[in-house]
Amino acid sequence: MEPVTTHNSLTESTKFNLPTSNEDSDFTKKNNHIAYIAFGSNEGNQTRNINEALHYLEKAKINIVSTSSLYISKPMYYKDQPDFFNGVVKVSFKDLSPYDLWKKCKEIEYKHVNRVKKFDNGPRSIDLDILLYDDIIFNTNDLIIPHKSMLERSFVLQPLCELLSPDILHPVSAEPFHHHLAQLLAVESNETLQESSNLLQIIPVPRLELDYNKNPLKFDQLKYNQQTLIMGILNITPDSFSDGGDNFNVSAAEIEATVLRLIEEGATILDIGGVSTRPGSVAPSEEEELKRVLPVVKTIRESKNEKLSTCLISIDTYRAKVAQKCLEAGADIINDISMGLYDPQIFDVVAKYQCPYIMNHTRGTPEIMSTLTNYESNTNEDIIEYMVDPLNPSYKIENCDPQVINLINGISRELGLQILKSFTRGVRKWQIILDPGIGFAKNLSQNLSIIKHASSFKKYSMVVNERGEEDVEHFYLSFNGLASLLGPSRKKFLGTICNEPVARDRVISTGAAIMACIQQSTDIVRVHDVKEMKKVVQMGNAIYKNIY
C-alpha cells in the first residue's frame, strides 16, 4: 500500500499546508470512511466531557459506530496531574478528508468542550486524536496517521484492540495490532514516563461522576486483582422462587431495616425486583411492577441514613417504563434479564440516562425457556467468531467438549447481537455488564459449564458482516474489557445436585458455586444470603486474587 503524500511532508517543510484539491478528491470519492479516534480527559467532569465530545461528533454528521470500554490511566510524560479517563471510538462519515476530520476534532476540543492547553501533555478537559483513517498512511506537519505514539501507550492500544479484529494489521509495521498490544503488555512500564501502565476499566455511574473514587464499579480485566463485588437481592414479589413474599407489602421502616442489614452484611449493590422470572412464572402488569418497586427506591434514596441514601441501587426489570421511572427516582443500574428482547425501548432509556446496564442472556419467556436449551455451532457465514486474550494472541480453549464450546459461543453470540443492537440506539460499551444467565434457558449441566468456564466469556469476539446492495459493512465486537456478573444463588440445579428441595437451604451449595465464580474472574456475584456469601467472597479474593 502506498502512503498518501502531500506537498507539506515532514521532511519538506516546517509549515502546514492543506492537501491539494486532487488529494482531497481522493478521500471524498469514497462514499463512506471509517476512522478510530482516541479520547482522554482528566479535568472537570470527565465522563460528561467525553459524552459531550461524542455528541458534537455526531452533530457534525460523524456517526458513532461503537466505543471501547472506558479506562482509568495514570498520566504519561507529565506525571504531576490527575488520572485520565481514556478510550477509543470507531466512527463513520462521508466527504471528510483526514485533515477535515482533524479540524473537526480540534473544534470540538477548544470550542465546544472548552479545552485550555497550557503546555504539552498537560491536563485537559478533552483530547481527541485520530489513530486510523481507513487503511491509509498520512504524513504532514500537523497530522500523522497512523498515530505515531499509539504503540507505546497502553491507554490507547488496549481500547483500540477492543474495536479491531485480531487479523487487522498496522499499516506501517504490517503486524497485527493485537500482537503489538501483547508485546506492550509484556514489558514493564517506564516509571520515568508513567507511574504505571496498568489500566482499570470503569463503568460510570452518573450520580457519582464528580467523584469517581466513590464508584466501586472499577475492574482490572487483565490481572483480575480487584475486589469481587456482592449484589444483594431484594425481591418485592409474592412469588419469587426462594424468597417470595418476604418483602411484599411491608412498611417503609421494614424496607429500610432490610436494606441496612444487607449493606452492613457486605452488599455493595442492591438489586430490587418486582417481577418473578423463575421458569414458568407469569409476569404482573407494568403498573403493578411500578407499584411494587418505585416506593422502595424512593424510600432508600430519601432515607436519613447515609448508608442507604448513597448505596448503589439496581432495578431488576426488562420494561423500559419501569426502568425510566426508577432511574428518575434515584436508581443507578438497570438489570435486564431479557438483554433487550422483551422491550427493545429499554435501550433508549439506558442510552438517555447513561446508566450501567446488566445484559442477562435468555431465550424465550419464563413460561417456555426451560425447553430452549439446545445450543449449536455457528452456521451463519456472516458471523466470524474469535477467542481473544490480550495477553496471549494465540489463545485457544483447550481440551473442551464441543458441546461446551457451542454453549459458550451460542450464549455469547446471542448476547453480542443484542449488544450491537443497543449500540445503534446510543448505548456505549462502557455501560454494559455481561451476565451469561445461569438458569435462563440452561439445563443443569449447562449451568455447571457456565460457572466452570465463566472467564471464557470475557474473551469472546465476533465480526458481523452486513451486506448492502453495493458493499459489505463489518462490525466487530469484543467482550474484552467487559465486567461480568453471575447469579447462581439458591437456584434449582444446586438443590438437584445436593438434594436440597427447599431453596432457602441452599446456602452452602451457593457458597461453593460462588467460590468457583471467583476463581473464574467474575466481577460481581448476585446473592440472597449476603452475610454468608461475604465470607465466601473474602476467602475467594484471598485465594485467587491475593486480596486479604
Image (cartoon, rainbow, N blue to C red):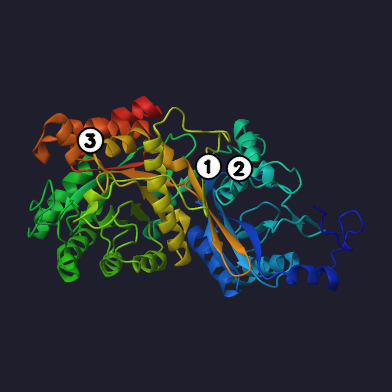
Q: Earlier in the sequence, mark 1 or mark 2?
A: 2
> What is the x, y in percent for residue 326?
26, 65
Q: Is residue 115 left or right of residue 489?
A: right
Q: Residues within 10 Å of mark 3 (few under 14, many from 20)?
A: many
Q: Contact (CB < 8 A) between labels 1 and 3? A: no
Q: Secondary structure at mark 3?
A: helix
Q: Contact (CB < 8 A) between labels 1 and 2? A: yes
Instruction: Name the residue type under label 1.
Output: Leu
Residue 294 has which mark?
none
Closest to the observer, 396 or 431: 396
Q: Is residue 448 left or right of residue 129?
A: left
Q: Mark 3 highlights which residue?
A: 533
> What is the x, y in percent for residue 120?
71, 53
Q: At 34% across and 61% down in the image, what residue appears?
A: 340
Q: CA distance from mark 1 to mark 3?
A: 28 Å
Q: Contact (CB < 8 A) between labels 3 and 2? A: no
Q: Residues within 10 Å of mark 1 (few under 14, many from 20)?
A: many
Q: Is residue 527 above or below residue 360?
A: above
> What is the x, y in percent for residue 500?
11, 34
Q: Mark 1 highlights which residue?
A: 199
Instruction: Name the residue type under label 2.
Output: Ser
What quarter of the picture does the C terminus occupy?
top left
Residue 103's image quarter? bottom right
Q: Earlier in the sequence, mark 1 or mark 3?
A: 1
Q: At 91% across and 59% down in the image, what residue appears?
A: 13
Q: Mark 2 highlights which residue?
A: 154
Closest to the observer, 310 or 419: 419
Closest to the observer, 403 or 356: 403
Q: Is residue 243 above or below residue 399?
A: below
